[in-house]
């Protein structure tokens, strides 16, 4: 074998090692930042009784927008539980995005909705609206019936008809905590520069659920779900928390997020036809608003406020991850001028490059790393001992990070009541390294390949609708 | 070379393994300790709850009661009493507070109040305030000079619960030295006072204090519907440029319907900040629109949606004479936003009537 | 008081408050059905046919106002007096409750004497 190829392979190994060291450092940094953030946040919440102050405060009314597509099974329960939320003044706007099932009929029979004659207040792009209804029993429930146009389109239609200055966007199957609106509205009231706030999402699989509320938090029996629980804890408790400290959040979860209506209207609403509209809109907000007001803030609240069912089968998990990966690429590609642009502060210098190098390109490095590693191993370029040692370090470091996020959860929110659940979570943090992680990386790698090859749309099932956990 | 590298890696593995081990132990320890505390509390409650009910019913002697509780269980007792103090008022509240006033418990709390540990000081101040123990007032006042924000907030809150009106000025002055003490935190403290705190605060409103404090004070006046402050609040409104303070003053004037403020509020209809216009419209609606009906009606066609909405809602609720005109706008066939807003507001009223 | 025990349905999620109220109601000789959340209150009312309903406004699953609405819609239950417990003197929800036909409301924290007097008042009227 020519020496030059050997050298290339060897240096690629070193490159991967370097990449690995960089990601370790960044994670450590994020961890420190998020520990500081959480401790400070806890102190704040501890002292102030939200409800008491709220009565006197200039709370901003909220419109909750619920885009729905073929949700006849769960829609009534969802709406009922939304109407029970604790907040002084809010309305629920259900947008029926051209469902082919009985979603609209269900709303008719259960809430006594009747047609009203008012028209949209804003002109964000969306497919034509057929009719607008108000419930007789709940004057704060509005239903918008429109032609099918996808999730972004449906949300835009909802914004056009929403009455209140804050807009919360909620998936129809999200399970919300009773005080979630009080919590998510708070950053807006403390700081006028806040344009968007994300909520922390937790996994509802395995939990006891009564009429649209999580009654008891339990860990699922499926390992596939448990791995995702660890992933979510990591992503929210230290990933987003750390990025928040740098005001570099690039995505707020579509399952529960809140915006200033004026900000949404100003940037023209959600981008219809985008793969990952949740991420795209946040990047665009950073871009537009930070230019005119460098103090603009996009933040998130670490409290677990929203619970959602995650895919419990490999097939649906794959389609979800492929979609996410394509969304990330799309968002980054559309706004690549932020990369290393100091105009955007830490976002340009650290947050955006982080997403580009590690979130977007991570799978490429990882998968090619594995391949080259195996090749070098068989070509006797690296010693087996070295290979095993290196892999052990990689895995252990990942485990430390996962455990740190469990600790964060334990000192702040303590939602898993049983000690057994905690121990299972630790076990999951170990086991996920043998198969699960590689599988997810592989799917994301495939997504990149597909994206480059030009298949930018949603997975087949999602082409029109968006009921996301099919 | 590669031997050294391997050596280093093995070291790292060893360190990481230890970290994992220690971290897991730490979490489990945390959890076990927490579980132990909860179990202990439950056990104590099962044991003593009945005794407390009996004490309440038979109007028992507080000293006798406390004597029966071993001193190492005082914290558990306090936690149990806390639930009662939070849920009850009247004579039962007094009976429970009597228990905390007993010398043994009181001394226990004071000792903790003078501790170096923030946590202890905070919980101790909390109980002294919750049970309104006037005897501890001077000690709490001394604690206001602390550098720690949590200690300050808890002691100030307790003083407010004791209704120590004479220290409210000191609380405000001391609050200034904490950089990130927000309007909310201050309001949280002041809300614990009774209505008699309004008079001294009224004097402070005209003095040189930061705007966020004025804002908190005006909110508090609104909460207590403190009529006497109306002229001073109106004066504050004329003098300030601070938007938040302006909004707060307008809300106060609206809430107590202080008609004399009309001349100050009227020009604010055209304020360049839409939030101010919105509050001004709502306020004028409540004070009586009089000659301003047309002006408010014209706000239905403002550029700002919030202003338009406020005008429509105000007309529908407070200005019957303009309702016909609002109806007419609603029947327009054009697609102006004003039409849509008018229709929405009217359909909501319609539904209320229907429901 | 009547020789037959009067029945009270009591819905409240706060544990310690529940204990206190249960103790007090028991002492005064009422038969009490307690519900820790709003979930089954309405069906409980139909089942037990209480003489009085005492319910918290803010509760998991179903809040007091919704419960009130549903009880007033059913001809079988609409005449049962309902007192609600409210922790925040949020004028809006109190007014809404009274508009919907609640007999009375009590602000938390309250005194046991006050609660007892209001309950007696509602039961004597009947």
Image (cartoon, helix red, strand yellow):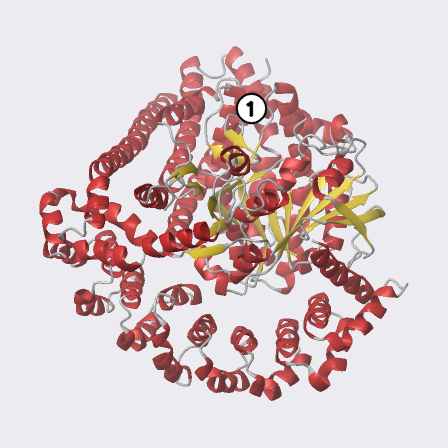
Quarter of the view holding residue B164? bottom left
In the shown orientation, is residue B170 left or right of residue C108? Answer: left
In the picture as drawn, the residue positioned furthest to the front comes out as C3
Q: How many marks?
A: 1
Q: Is residue B264 left or right of residue B180?
A: right
The answer to whether A208 is drawn above or below residue C101 in the figure is above
C80 or A72, nearer to the observer: C80
Measured along the vertical axis of the image, is residue A123 above or below residue B191?
Answer: above
Left or right: B125 as drawn, with respect to B175: left
Residue beneath the point at 68% across and 60% down: A262
Residue B64 visible in this rendered orientation of the protein: yes
Mark 1 belongs to chain: A
Identify the image quadrant of residue B206.
Answer: bottom left
Q: Position of residue A97 (x, y in %)?
A: 78, 40
- In the rendered image, residue A295, in percent from the top left (x then y), is placed at 56, 62
- Please tell me whether mark 1 sits on a helix, a strand or a loop: helix
Q: Is residue A18 visible?
A: no
* Near-viewer residue (A381 or A99): A99
Instruction: Say if B342 sits above or below A403 in the image.
Output: below
- Residue displayed at 65% across by 81% down: B288
Give the residue at x 37% y 55%: C117
Quadrant of the image containing the N terminus of chain A:
top right
Residue C8 in picture, x, y percent from top left: 43, 42
- Residue A267, quarter of picture: bottom right
Q: Position of residue B315 (x, y in %)?
A: 72, 72
Mark 1 Cα-neighbour bin, 10 Å: few <14, some 14–19, many ≥20: some
- C90 up-or-down from A257: above or below: below
Location of the C terminus of chain A (image quadrant): top right
Read off the residue under disc 1: A369
Closer to us: A260 or B11: A260
């Amino acid at each position: 074998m020519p020496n030059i190829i050997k050298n290339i392979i060897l240096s690629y190994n070193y490159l991967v090692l370097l990449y690995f060291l960089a990601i370790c450092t960044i994670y450590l940094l994020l961890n420190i930042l998020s520990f500081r953030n959480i401790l400070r946040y806890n102190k704040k919440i501890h002292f102030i009784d939200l409800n008491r102050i709220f009565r006197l405060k200039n709370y901003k009314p909220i419109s909750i927008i619920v885009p729905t597509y073929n949700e006849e099974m769960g829609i009534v329960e969802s709406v009922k539980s939304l109407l029970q939320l604790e907040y002084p003044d809010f309305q629920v706007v259900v947008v029926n995005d051209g469902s082919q099932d009985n979603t609209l009929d269900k709303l008719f029979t259960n809430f006594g909705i009747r047609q009203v004659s008012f028209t949209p207040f804003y002109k964000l792009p969306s497919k034509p609206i057929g009719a607008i209804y108000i419930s007789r029993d709940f004057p704060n429930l509005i239903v918008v019936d429109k032609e099918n146009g996808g999730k972004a389109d449906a949300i835009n239609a909802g914004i056009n008809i929403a009455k209140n200055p804050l807009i919360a966007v909620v998936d129809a199957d999200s399970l919300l905590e009773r005080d979630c609106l009080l919590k998510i509205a708070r950053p807006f009231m403390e700081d006028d520069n806040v344009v968007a706030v994300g909520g922390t999402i937790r996994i509802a699989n395995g939990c006891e659920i009564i009429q649209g509320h999580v009654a008891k938090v339990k860990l699922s029996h499926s390992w596939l779900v448990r791995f995702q629980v660890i992933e979510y804890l990591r992503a929210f408790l230290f990933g987003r928390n750390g990025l928040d400290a740098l005001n570099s959040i690039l995505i707020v979860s579509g399952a529960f997020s809140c915006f200033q209506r004026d900000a949404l209207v100003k940037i023209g609403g959600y981008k219809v036809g985008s793969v990952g509209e949740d991420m795209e809109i946040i990047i665009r907000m950073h871009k537009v608003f930070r230019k005119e007001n460098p103090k603009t803030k996009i933040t998130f609240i670490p409290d677990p406020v929203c619970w959602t069912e995650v895919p419990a089968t490999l097939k649906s998990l794959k389609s979800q991850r492929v979609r996410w990966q394509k969304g990330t690429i799309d968002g980054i590609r559309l706004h690549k001028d932020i990369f290393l642009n100091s105009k955007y502060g830490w976002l340009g210098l650290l947050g955006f490059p982080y997403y580009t190098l590690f979130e977007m390109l991570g799978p490429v490095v990882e998968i090619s790393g594995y391949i080259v590693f195996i090749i070098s191993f068989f070509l006797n370029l690296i010693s087996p001992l070295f290979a095993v040692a290196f892999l052990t370090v990689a895995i252990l470091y990942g485990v430390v990070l996962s455990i740190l996020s469990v600790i964060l959860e334990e000192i702040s929110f303590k939602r898993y009541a049983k000690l057994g659940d905690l121990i299972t979570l630790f076990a999951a943090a170990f086991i996920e390294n043998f198969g699960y992680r590689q599988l997810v990386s592989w799917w994301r790698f495939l997504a990149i390949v597909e994206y480059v090859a030009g298949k930018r749309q949603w997975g087949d099932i999602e082409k029109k609708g968006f009921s996301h956990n099919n | 070379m590669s031997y050294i590298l391997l050596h280093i890696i093995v070291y790292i593995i060893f360190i990481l393994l230890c970290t994992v081990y220690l971290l897991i132990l730490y979490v489990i320890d945390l959890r076990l300790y927490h579980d132990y505390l909860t179990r202990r509390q439950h056990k104590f409650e099962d044991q003593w709850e009945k005794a407390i009910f009996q004490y309440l019913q038979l109007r028992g002697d507080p000293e006798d009661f406390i004597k029966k509780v071993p001193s190492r269980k005082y914290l558990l007792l306090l936690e149990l009493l806390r639930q009662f103090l939070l849920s009850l008022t009247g004579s039962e509240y007094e009976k429970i507070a009597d228990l905390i006033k007993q010398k043994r418990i009181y001394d226990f709390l004071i000792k903790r109040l003078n501790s170096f540990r923030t946590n202890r000081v905070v919980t101790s101040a909390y109980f002294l305030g919750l049970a309104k123990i006037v005897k501890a007032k001077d000690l709490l006042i001394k604690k206001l000079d602390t550098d720690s924000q949590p200690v300050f907030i808890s002691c100030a809150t307790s003083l407010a619960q004791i209704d120590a009106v004479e220290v409210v000025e000191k609380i405000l002055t001391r609050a200034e030295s904490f950089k990130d003490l927000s309007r909310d935190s201050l309001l949280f403290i002041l809300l614990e006072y009774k209505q008699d705190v309004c008079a001294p605060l009224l004097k402070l409103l005209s003095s040189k204090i930061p705007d966020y404090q004025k804002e908190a004070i005006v909110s508090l006046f609104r909460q207590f519907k403190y009529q006497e402050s109306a002229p001073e609040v109106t004066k504050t409104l004329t003098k300030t440029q601070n938007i938040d303070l302006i909004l707060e003053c307008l809300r106060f004037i609206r809430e107590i319907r202080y008609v004399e403020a009309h001349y100050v509020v009227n020009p604010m209809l055209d304020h360049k900040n839409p939030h101010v216009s919105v509050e001004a419209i709502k306020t004028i609606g409540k004070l009586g629109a009089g000659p301003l009906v047309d002006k408010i009606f014209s706000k239905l066609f403002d550029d700002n949606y919030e202003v338009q909405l406020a005008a429509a809602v105000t007309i529908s609720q407070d200005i019957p004479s303009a309702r016909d005109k609002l109806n007419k706008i609603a029947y327009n066939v054009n697609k102006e936003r004003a039409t849509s807003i008018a229709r929405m507001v009217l359909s909501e009223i319609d539904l209320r009537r229907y429901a | 008081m009547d020789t037959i025990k009067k029945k009270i349905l009591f819905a409240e999620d706060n544990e310690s408050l529940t204990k206190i109220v249960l103790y007090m109601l028991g002492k005064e000789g009422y038969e009490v059905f307690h519900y820790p959340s709003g979930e089954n209150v309405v069906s409980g009312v139909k089942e037990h046919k209480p003489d009085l309903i005492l319910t918290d406004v803010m509760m998991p699953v179903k809040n007091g106002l919704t419960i009130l609405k549903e009880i007033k819609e059913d001809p079988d239950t609409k005449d049962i007096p309902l007192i609600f417990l409210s922790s925040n003197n949020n004028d809006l929800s109190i007014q809404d409750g009274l508009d919907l036909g609640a007999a009375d409301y009590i602000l938390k924290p309250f005194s046991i004497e006050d609660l007892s007097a209001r309950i007696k008042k509602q039961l004597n009227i009947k």
